[in-house]
Amino acid sequence: MSSIVKQDQILLKGIPASPGIAIGPVFLYRKQAPQIQEKTISPAEADQEVERLNEAMARSQKELRKILEFAQSKLGDQQARIFEAQLMILEDDVLLQSILRRVREELKNVEFVVENEIGKYHRMMLAAQDEYTRERAHDVEDVKNRILRNLQQEKLVSRLDGSYIIASHSLAAADTLIFSRNDVLGYAMEVGGVTSHSALLARALKIPMVVGLRDITTRLQHGDVMIVDGHNGMVIINPTDESIDEYEKRRERYREFQQRLQVLRDLPAETLDGRRIQLAANIELEEELDSLHLRGGDGIGLFRSETLLLGKEVFPSEDEQYEQYKRLVDAVYPKPVIIRTFDIGGDKMMVHAGKENNPFLGWRGIRVMLAKEELFLDQLRAILRASSRKNVMMMFPMVSHIKEVREAKALVEVAKRDLREHNIPYDEEIKIGIMVEVPSAAVIADDLAREVSFLSIGTNDLIQYLLAVDRTNDIVSDLYQEFHPAVIRFLRRIIERGRSKNVWVGMCGEMAGDPLATVLLVGLGLDEFSVVPSVLPEIKKIIRSIRYEEAKNVAHHVLSLQTEDEIKGYLKEYMREKFPEIPIE
Amino acid sequence: MIEREVTIKNRAGLHTRPAATLVKLAAKFKSDFFIAKDGFEINGKSIIGVMTLAAEQGSKLRLRFSGEDEEEMAKAIVDLFERGFDEK
């Protein structure tokens, strides 16, 4: 092939999972199950097979201990537990002995016996009724593949030389961790959500990541050059020199911009004409607290308490939860923290229940917790105990009926009474709010507002429910539109209804962190933004550069437009003129 | 040989941590120990086997002990089930 022929660059759109820009060669990570052949061996060879297994087991244990140690130091004991379970399986003597016995008795090669023996357990676990056991089946499979790989003396693929962008179908938590020990520039993955374990890790480790890139691994070869744009959720394969230039400049601009934004850190998020906006951060991992301080947010607008459940087999006890909330709350004091009670179900961790045909319209959020009263009370007491310094608020997810708010509030009173009886301090005036993420809640926002102190709009789910679009469904995902006129009118309605009842209205969905939406949201009267820490400075900069009166005019104009294209076109034009230095997609 | 029937009492069922506690205790005895549930049986000294049981709260298990210290072993293991693996 002539070297003059230059391949066209390929641009793929995915979902941004961790911000930043990476440019570099690709390491194609294919997680293929090792190919195993069944071979008959002679009795004399059996000893060699046993010896090979012992060596492979020792190497596998050594690897896993390293991963475990690394996970403990990076993520804490809690989340490292997945690897502890894997290590226990490796150390299962009964399992080892039965493999050895079968090698000697059946005279088969050890790879075949390992595959067959551990595979048996794997299949049984996959067939289990409960989600938890099915999840553990992956651990068993990981262990099996690790042993097989070591039997075949394959080097750990994660020992890369040089800096790479990892492209893969998916990454298990262990993979993300091993890769992060090397100089990983970025991640491009076919599947995986923004809230997946590996996306959380990528953000904690500050490595750009784009997910949802469908068939990317079939379009790539080892060593291809690629650009990962973790801001806009885009990758470019075999970029032209012009694209590389452009993205290097963007990366540099972004760095400079971030530095310049540091000066904004201690300044309030206030418009030129004096409207003070609360600009808080969504926090999932304790590691992210540093960036909150560095970037100058007004506290935590959303702490997703279900991250406490990651890698856990039981619901954490009241005391365990209290310890964690307390650490978070103390780290941010005197700024406020809004703790959202467990939002489980939907796509997130399930408490034992049968399969639901339509989990997003099923048993999730407050619906689950009201049915699990004891668990809910544990959590409410833990949150209340953490509130003794008066910088805690709590919020309920997935509210769709006013009755749910009333029942949840009644349980808060029960929890308070329990604490009073034991003379345990808490904030008697703790503020309670709800997420508005179901259209019915938006419609009755004024009634709901009478029951609570604040409303926080969860745009991701609200938009899905309002537009009847599952944004993870490729066929219709382009109908998921943040700037659909119905969405904007709905937002106006919620904000007006809430404010008319004198409660403040915030937003903790992705839209709050989209710079293109900032002026519009300020103009609609939003009181609080809660955003991923990485975009805090940009959003603050925009808020500090506009007048509230002007933002209202922008919102007014947007409300008169009829399509998302018109709305985005108008806002982009406005932003380009006013903030040329802010990267807008 | 001794046979006993037990019911899982703790909320989380026989998940990883209780399974580890059970296997560790079983390792202290010399006798063989098997657990049967829904018609299949696993070695109670094997963590991967116990994990495979997927025994939730309320599940009934049949325990079988045989060996020189089967009496003491049965007593200790049944007691651990009774205490709900010392978990909440």
Image: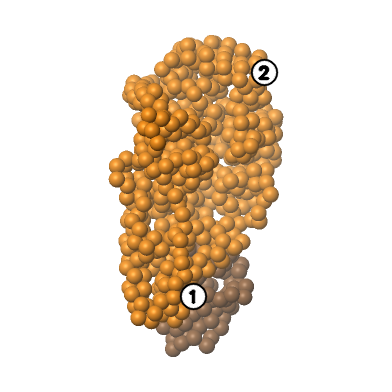
Secondary element under disc 2, as helix, strand or loop, is loop
Q: Is residue A16 above or below residue A567?
A: below
Q: Which three-letter amino acid code belongs to the residue tagged 1? A: Gly
Residue placed under numbered mark 1 in the picture: B44
Mark 1: few/some/many CA within 10 Å (<14, 14-19, 20+): many
Q: Chain of mark 1?
A: B
- Measured as percent of width and height from the top left, residue B12 is found at 54, 61
The residue sitting at 41% across, 29% down in the picture is A6
Q: Colour of chain B?
A: brown
The residue sitting at 47% across, 58% down in the picture is A33
Out of A433 and A428, give the one closest to the viewer: A433
Out of A117 and A10, give the one closest to the viewer: A10
Out of A381 and A123, give the one closest to the viewer: A123
- Measured as percent of width and height from the top left, residue A509 is found at 54, 32
Q: Residue A293 falls in which quadrant of the image?
A: top left
The residue sitting at 59% across, 75% down in the picture is B40
Secondary element under disc 1, as helix, strand or loop, is loop
Of the two numbered discs 2 and 1 in the rendering, the one whose residue sits closer to the viewer? 2
Tell whether label 1 touches label 2 (CB within 8 Å). no
The residue sitting at 46% across, 29% down in the picture is A8
Residue placed under numbered mark 2 in the picture: A562
